Amino acid sequence: MRYRRSNTPNATYFFTVNLAERHRDLLTANVDALRAAIRKVKQRHPFQIKAIVIMPDHLHAIWQLPEGDADFALRWSLIKSNFSKSLAKVERINPSRTLKRERGIWQRRYWEHQIRDDVDLQSHVDYIHYNPVKHGYVSHAVDWPYSSIHAYIKSGLLPKDWAGYAGNNSQYGE
């Protein structure tokens, strides 16, 4: 099956990428390996990360692709592959994945959304930063260590108490 994906060079995209087994915590347990995989891919296939949050079983990211380049699919494929190669083979691998030489770590598909304008961008950045609160991991967005919220606070784009308590931010999925 061939999926239709946006193909706009220099565009900004929001992504959700999930583990195959959503009860696992591979991403936070191996966050250094994930970061290394992202760095490695960025060196050969540059892109800018506008915002990111790494959760135990999924991640959300916003990327800005370079001028003349729309190939986010290649980048995700390489990130997934590099991360998977860094882990011991302990996951369950079903026969269809074995035939395609895939590990059983990632869901094959991911969600992508092309950012339309500044309001859409801000909405998705806020969603990313609020995600650990939404999932009940922390009460304050700033308390989640695997989030670009820290860079936003350091640069003065957000106050340290942004989205402070779960339940006070119904616009972000509560």
Image (cartoon, grey):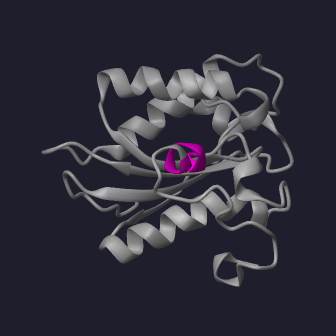
Please, what is the dominant secondary structure of the magenta stretch? helix
Q: Where is residue 137 in the image (x, y as percent from the top left)?
A: 84, 54
- Percent x, y for residue 140? 77, 59
Of the pair 32 and 24, the residue shown nearer to us: 32
Residue found 29% across the figure and 32% down from its top: 46
Q: Where is residue 90 in the image (x, y as percent from the top left)?
A: 83, 23
Residue under the point 58% across and 59% down? 159
What's drawn in magenta, residue-wise? 148-153
Q: In this view, does 76 lie to the left or right of 93?
A: left
* Residue located 27% across and 46% down the image: 65
Report x, y in % for residue 164: 74, 66
Rendered image quadrant of residue 14:
bottom left
In the rendered structure, does residue 72 fall within the stretch colored magenta? no
Q: Which residue lies furthest to the bottom in this view?
A: 170
Q: Quadrant of residue 93?
A: top right
Please tell me whether residue 89 is drawn above or below residue 75 in the rendered image.
above
Residue 108 seen in this snapshot: no
Q: Is residue 68 left or right of residue 12?
A: left
Camera-nearest residue between 66 and 106: 66
